[in-house]
Every structure is written in structure tokens, then in C-alpha cells.
Image (cartoon, rainbow, N blue to C red):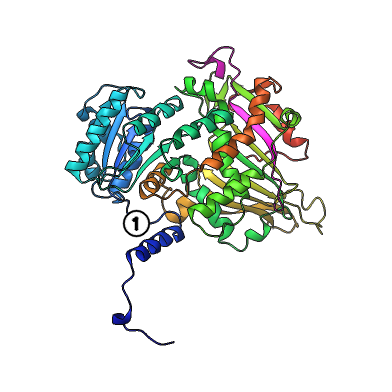
Amino acid sequence: MTETSDEQVPEPSAAMQSAAMQSAAVAATPGSSRLPQPAVLVIFGATGDLTARKLMPAVAALESKGELPAGFEVVGVGRDQISDDDFAERMRSAATSGDTSDWTEVAARARYVGGDYADPETFRRLYTVMAEIDEQRGSGGNRLYYLATPPSTFASVISLLGEHGLNKPGPGGSFARVVIEKPFGEDLESALELDRQVHAVFDEDQVYRIDHYLGKETVQNLLVLRFANAVFEPIWNRRYVDSVQITVAESLGIGHRAEFYEGAGALRDIVQNHLMQVLALTVMEPPVSMDPQGIRDEKVKALRAVDILTPEEVATDVVRARYERGVVEGEEVVGYREEDGVDRRSQTETFVAMRLWVDNWRWAGVPFYIRTGKRMPRRLTEVSLKFHNAPHLPFAPQQASGMGPNTLVLRIEPDEGISLCFGAKAPGEAFDLRTVALDFSYQQTFGSTPPDAYQRLLRDALAGDPTLFIRSDEVEQAWRIVAPIQEAWRNEDVKLGRYPAGTWGPKEADQLIQRDGRAWRLP
């Protein structure tokens, strides 16, 4: 090969440079370390609970770690009529840890626009504020809109952003993006209609549908565990896996969210989004490359492989229930129908369990048991893969009586980590087998707990990395999976059971899995 001097190398054209930059962006793995461009973060619902508990602490933490660019600004939009200074004080008080000196400066520059989300005047004032910020503070004309409002306002906010030209970057800007919280729609039909309304204003590559579970380290670690470790990928299939359980348990009740929860229930609040996302990452095929398109393509394929339940299967393979009075973590709590704001005749479910099948080559014949509930013994989210028993045990039955099945458990929260349970001989003269665990803990290994998911997702949205956000066709397919369940419940084909608060659910959920000769894993 002939060497070429620097002088002989022609300068690449602008088109070539652009193509190279695009290729590099596509080839980049999720979570690029590059800083986002200067931008204005506009939060609709700026005085609400989500903003105070999650968004402001996440942005403050990013600022304290130097992961936000110069020229980053915040504008709050809300129904409350407060001043810029009042909003700035709320921002400062939301920063709960770390060095907040830089965050204090960001908060001091914050602007606030009060008004109704369906009032054009609100958006005229917002347009004026954005223009002032672009001119005075070097925010570059880039915008990230975050819809931390009730889902009923999504359509009007998006429509009015379009009517006032706020769906496009300002002068000199390169992007205008919108982050939409879950749930995206109430059912398949409303999700499709909302999608149509969104796409009338924003292109798909401007839309970031957020599910904070995808920002959790252990959820992301599913990809690493499966596709970076030769010991796991060969056994991640029907030949070795007997069954899979996915559990999302909460010890809390509904708190002050009665209005939302009465209209949502556990199916819409957790199953259609969080559980479907974790299921997709668990069953998906290896992507061609770890870029946004590769990962999201495989997630959609995985959800399309999930069998859609027939009405008869909904009646036999789905359990729903509500919690009643009980004791949780030593405290006596009221039942769901006794909670403030809940209809005393409510038919809303606080617990769902179901059996699903994934109809593809890898998972044919493997049952997936998923469950979620409120007022359970403790907060817990995990994925558990139970493996087939060894084909032959050369030990006497009494020797192996203390050994359970081999199990791989991914703890998503709160004690993030991974456990591999297998058989070993207990110390002593007797040949007794016991189940032991190889345990990996994020806290013990890395010396700290993983950052809050919103930090990662907000940064990715600002940087234009959609890997951990949900694509339009993915939302649609998740709704198609739960649609027959919603229809059966509207027709009251599945009765609403009951379970005492502080337990792992109703007896019907135990019966669902026991009829297959299996049992729910007890954490």
C-alpha cells in the first residue's frame, strides 16, 4: 500500500462532511458523551408534582455534573399565576443534592408563562418570551418542550405550538423537539388519533415519547447482559428457559392521584407501557447495531410476536383485583375504595396478572407471567428467568430437596443488581444440595446508586438520542396487546377480585400460575 502525504489528501466537500457526521451519529452507541447544544427547556405543567419531584432535580443534577451546555435556559408554563421570581424559587428548592451553585444561576434566569393550555394567548406570550431568550441569552434557537401535564391536554398544547410556529427552531436553531409523558392515549383508537394530531405538527423524529423505566440502569443493562456476554446469549431461549416472570410491585397506594388513577388503573398505568417495555427488551433479538433504529426495530418485532389474547383467553389468563384494608410495612392502610377521591363503587383495578406467549422461534412454548399491583408487601421491579431442570439428577431425592430451579433475576429497583441462583453442596459430611446465589449489586460494585432515570432521558432528548424513547409503531403495538383486555373488562367478562393490602395479590393470581405447575417467585 502506498502512503499518501497530508498535502495529497483532498479536503472533503461539505456534503461529504455532512454524510460523515450523520454516519458517525448513527453508529454511535446510546448515551453519547457529547454535550447537547444550547437550548431552551420549556416545561408545560411547570408547577405540578412531576416537575417538582423528578424534572427539576434531574436537570439540577445534570447542571451540577457539567452535562448541560452554556446557553441552557428553562421556561415554565403552567395554569398557576406566579412570577418569574416565584418560579425561580421553586426551581432552587427542587435541587436536593450536589453542587447547586450553577443551578442557582440557571434558576435566576428562568422565565414563567401563566395561562390555560387551550388558550392561544398563553402561546403568544410563550412565543414572545422565547424570542427574547434567543436574542439575549445565546440559547441558539433550539427548543425542547416537555409535556408534564395531564394527558387530556396533550392535543391542545401540541396544536397550539404548531399554530404559533413553535414547532420549529428559532433563528439559527437546529431542532425543536417534544417530550410526551405516558400514557400515550387511553386505548388503541385514542392513541392512533393522538398520533395523528402529533404528526400534524411534529415529524416523528421530533417526538420523544418517554417511559422513565427505559432510563433505569438495570433495564438498559438487559442489553449488555444479553448481547455482550457469551455465557448468557446461548441459553436465552426456549431450549433452556422454562418460564419468565416480570413483576412491578408498589407498596404505596394511589396517594393524591385518585383522579388520574380512577381513569387509568393498573393496566394503563403500568402494563401498557412499563411492563411492555421490559418485556420487549427481554425477548428481542440481537440488533444489527446498537443505534436507535436497530434497537427500536427489534423491540417492535418483539411486541409483534406477542400473541394477542382472544376473549376466551382473557377470561382464563388475566386476573384483575383491587386492594382492601390491610397492613403494609407495619402500617394499617385503607382499601382502594376508601381512598380520598375514589368512587365507593369503583371498578378500577389496582392489580393485574396475566400469562402471555411470544410466538417466535426463540420463545415458542415459554409462558411469560407478568404482574403489577399497588399496596403490595414492598416496592419491587424485577425480571426472573427460570431455567429447565437438569435432565437427570444422580442424587437421592432427599439430598436435592433443598435445591430450587436455576434462576436468573434482574433487579430493576430498588436494589439494582443481578442474581444467578444455582445448586451447591452445603458444608458438612452429608451430601445436601442447597440453592445459592452469585450476586451483583450496583451499589457495592460501583460505590453509588444509579442516577435517576430522568437525568439520562432528559439529557438524551436534549442531545437528540432517541434510543431510549418509544417510537410510534411501538406504542401502537403495545396498545394492540392490551386492547382485547380492555374490551373484555368493558363487557365485565373478567370479574374484579380483591386482596388485602400488604399481600402479593389475590388468590386468583396464584391459581393462574399454579395450574401450569409453577409458582410466583417470592422475593
Q: Residue furthest top?
A: 344
The answer to which image quadrant residue 190 occupies is top right
Relative horizontal placement of residue 517, taking residue 463 as reference (left or right): right
* 169 relative to 89, above or below: below
Residue drawn at x 34%, y 46% is 175
Q: Nearer the viewer, residue 471 or 522?
A: 471
Q: Is residue 39 magenta?
A: no
* Residue 421 spot, x, y in % from top left: 64, 52
Mark 1 neighbour class, 10 Å CA radius: few under 14, some 14 to 19, many 20 or more: few
* Residue 329 spot, x, y in % from top left: 53, 29
* Residue 489 spot, x, y in % from top left: 66, 23
Identify the residue under disc 1: 34
Q: Nearer the viewer, residue 515 or 156?
A: 156
Residue drawn at x 34%, y 56% is 34
* 262 relative to 27, above or below: above
* 232 relative to 68, above or below: below
Residue drawn at x 40%, y 48% is 460
**What span is colored magenta in the figure?**
335-362
Q: Residue furthest left?
A: 136
* Residue 429 spot, x, y in % from top left: 73, 59
Report the predominant secondary structure element of the magenta stretch.
loop
Q: Residue furthest bottom?
A: 2
- Tell me the SS state at disc 1: loop
Q: Quadrant of the N terminus?
A: bottom left
Q: Is residue 342 magenta?
A: yes
Q: Nearer the viewer, residue 392 or 314?
A: 314
Q: Does residue 249 appear in this view?
A: no
Q: Quadrant of the C terminus?
A: top right
